Amino acid sequence: MDAGARLAARLDAHVDAAHDEAVAFLRELVRVPTDTPPGDNAAHAARTAELLAAMGFDVERHPVPQADVVAAGLVSLTNLVVRRRYGEGPVIALNAHGDVVPPGEGWTRPPYDGVVEDGRMYGRGVAVSKSDFATHAFALRALDAAAAEGAAAPRGSVELHFTYDEEFGGELGPAWLLRRGLTKPDLAIGPGFSYAIVTAHNGCLQLEVTVHGRAAHAAMPSTGIDALQGAVRILDALYAQHAAYAARRSALEGITSPTLNVGRIEGGTNTNVVPARVVFRLDRRIIPEEDAGAAEAGLRDVIAKAAARSPGLRVEVRRLLLARPLVPLPGHERIAASLARHGERVFGEPIRTTATPLYTDARHYGEAGVPVVLYGAGPRTILEANAKRADENLLLEDLRRATKVVAATLADLLASPAR
């Protein structure tokens, strides 16, 4: 057995020895609700900080100013940073988010108890992405233990970035830490699933369109300007654009074409009144080959041209979110190659590199010039985990194995000469 194999075995042993602690740690995280909205998540950060401190980590608490939190539509938010410095060398950031969507209906087990049955833990956020709080923290602890024994000689630093606004775009999480210079990593790993390494993902544009007409009695509709009729014309144009997107294909495995979805619509005052106002919201997914600015400009043009077909109509378009796509940056190959090698070693099967049509906080690291990939504890697909649905769950053996993969990857990346 060569030195690399001996180190990997030593790290594996430390992860195995602490597995029950990791499960208990995750259960504690699940038991503190972080529904977003409303996004009142400072209490979870406080509990997480307590648990990390009990593991021997120094935890930095970075509360976001309350005015900024309220302006973002949230209630409270504190970002956590743990720094472990082993000497001169690259800084590796490990990011995961603690905020989750509300549980919704249909649960057969309590969403905030962390129930364990047949080797699985059930609870909101147990797969996305509170599990990777545990993956990252216990991978770092395994590396610490191996270094203390002299089995590893890491050069560089590891940082844990635990943030709380991914569901609202991450602007007050990773983006906030990066913009303020509170972290300057060289490489990053974000939360993901165990059977694939994600190196690219779609962007997302969300717009709110308000169509203004003029109310009138339904007995005399010609005296008004029907905002709903105008909105229907705009919607027809948007759905035609969605159909046209199918011809534009991404070259990346895991991503198909741009998409457009109208997810919410409201308007009108009464059955016998010509609607004076209609509001709808749309979601436009942007493939990595597209320019986000051009995608938004094109969509606004479609809306304006369709609105012009209804004289007297006035339309307002407000951007709710612009999440740019994640594209692979030079240097990400080192992370992906190490994860793939150790993933195959631990799981006994090839771990593929792919892209995803979702958007994540990883894009903030990419936009800051930091090579980043997504990998962590979880099943092959979101559907298997019931992520964002009732009975979200995690196979605890995947938590163990993903932690081993991340720990060994950290050892690989920090064994490289300082740059």
Image: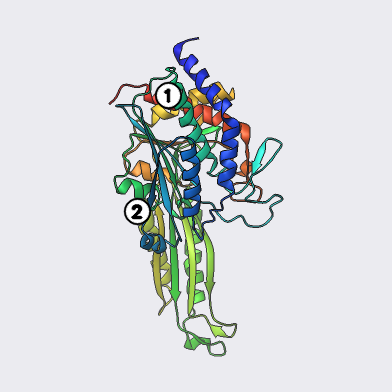
- x and y percentages locating residue 234 in the rendered image: 47, 67
| Residue at image point 54% right, 31% down | 402
Disc number for residue 125: none
Residue 379 vs residue 288, the one in the foreground:
379
The residue at the point 66 percent across, 48 percent down is 391
Q: Name the residue beneath numbered marker 2.
A: 294
Residue 72 lies in quadrant: bottom left
Query: Which mark lies nearer to you, 2 or 1?
Result: 1
Along the horizontal axis of the image, is 345 left or right of 82? right
Q: Is residue 183 among the parts visible in the rendering?
A: yes
Quarter of the picture containing the C terminus is top left
Percent coordinates x, y for residue 193 in the rendering? 54, 37
Label 2, residues with CA under 10 Å away: few <14, some 14-19, many ≥20: few
Q: Residue at x 60, y 82 (%)?
A: 271
Query: Which one is nearer the viewer's eye here, 57 or 176?
Result: 57
User: Judging from the image, what secondary structure is the residue with disc 2 in?
Assistant: helix
| N-terminal-most mark, 2 or 1 | 2
What's the mark number on residue 411?
Answer: 1
Residue 29 x %, y %: 55, 45
| Amino acid type, callout 1 | Ala
